[in-house]
């Protein structure tokens, strides 16, 4: 892990890598004098290098104390500080461990959204809505259904609220119409941070709802 930090985050030659004690001093220099995004990069890398959750809690406690705009979720540095929003994302990442396709979409949405140097908000939106669609397909047991089709079937066969169906159908239609969010992703768009955040949180919350509501059926 320290070798990766020296090589990838400090961009220093490996043959100049110091002993462990001196490397600690170099790493401390990043936190004291380095650019903010380098600090976040290192925290993110360390978080992703461990399999236990307590290190994320430790980092997040300090990030909150220092009033950072970032929190660590599933090894990613996420620019979200509202605790309720963070809980929704964390819950989604945990609950979808058994749904590989859904989790992969959420992971990609989070990665695109959280990239400190070059965030890709349009692809984040695409992956967020794809996660909701994938979970809906699982509920109705139809991998070919669009989100709109899945919502209609859930309303008819599972008692999905008409208001909830209408709201997500409208959101799905909106993302399909806006600058090819779900299509032709090689081109840039002006999808905003606020909208990408809105979609990530709401689609994750919808996935959580579907798991809670229908998993027991």
Image (tube, rainbow, N blue to C red):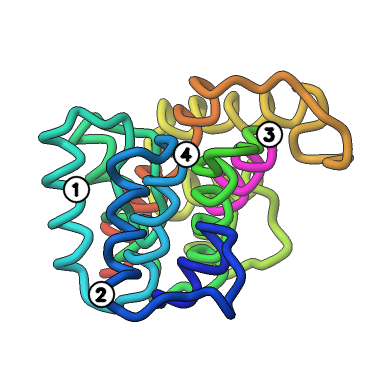
In the image, which is nearer the foreground, mark 1 or mark 4? 1
Please name the residue that numbered disc 4 is placed on. 200
Nearer the observer: mark 2 or 3; the answer is 2
x, y percent for residue 130? 62, 50
Mark 1 touching mark 3, by CB under 8 A? no
Quarter of the image with the C terminus in it: bottom left
- The percent position of residue 162, horizontal first and vertical second, equals 43, 31
Q: Residues within 10 Å of mark 3 (few under 14, many from 20)?
A: many
| Helix, strand or loop under label 3 | helix
| Residue at mark 1 | 60
Q: Is residue 104 left or right of residue 37?
A: right
In the picture, the disc for residue 122 is 3
Q: Examine the rendered structure and indicate whether residue 3 appears above or below residue 215.
A: below
Q: Residue at x 62, y 33 (%)?
A: 121
Q: Which residue is mark 2?
A: 21
Whole-number angstrom distance, CA of label 3 to CA of label 4: 11 Å
Residue 22 x/y as whole percent: 31, 70
């Amino acid at each position: 892990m320290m070798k990766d930090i020296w090589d990838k985050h400090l961009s220093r030659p490996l043959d100049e890598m110091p002993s462990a004690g001196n490397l600690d001093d170099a790493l401390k220099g990043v936190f004291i004098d380095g650019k903010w995004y380098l600090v976040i990069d290192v925290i993110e890398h360390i978080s992703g290098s461990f399999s236990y959750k307590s290190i994320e809690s430790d980092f997040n406690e300090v990030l909150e104390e220092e009033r950072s705009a970032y929190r660590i979720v599933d090894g990613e540095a996420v620019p979200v500080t509202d605790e309720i929003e963070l809980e929704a994302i964390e819950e989604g990442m945990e609950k979808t461990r058994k749904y590989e396709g859904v989790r992969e979409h959420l992971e990609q949405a989070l990665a695109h959204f959280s990239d400190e140097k070059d965030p890709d908000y349009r692809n984040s939106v695409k992956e967020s809505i794809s996660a909701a669609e994938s979970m809906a397909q699982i509920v109705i047991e139809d991998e070919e259904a669009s989100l709109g089709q899945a919502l209609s079937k859930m309303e008819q066969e599972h008692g999905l609220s008409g208001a909830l169906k209408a709201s997500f159908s409208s959101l799905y239609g909106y993302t399909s119409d806006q600058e090819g969010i779900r299509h032709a992703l090689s081109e840039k768009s002006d999808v905003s941070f606020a909208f990408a955040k809105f979609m990530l949180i709401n689609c994750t919350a919808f996935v959580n709802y579907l798991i809670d509501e229908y998993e027991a059926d």
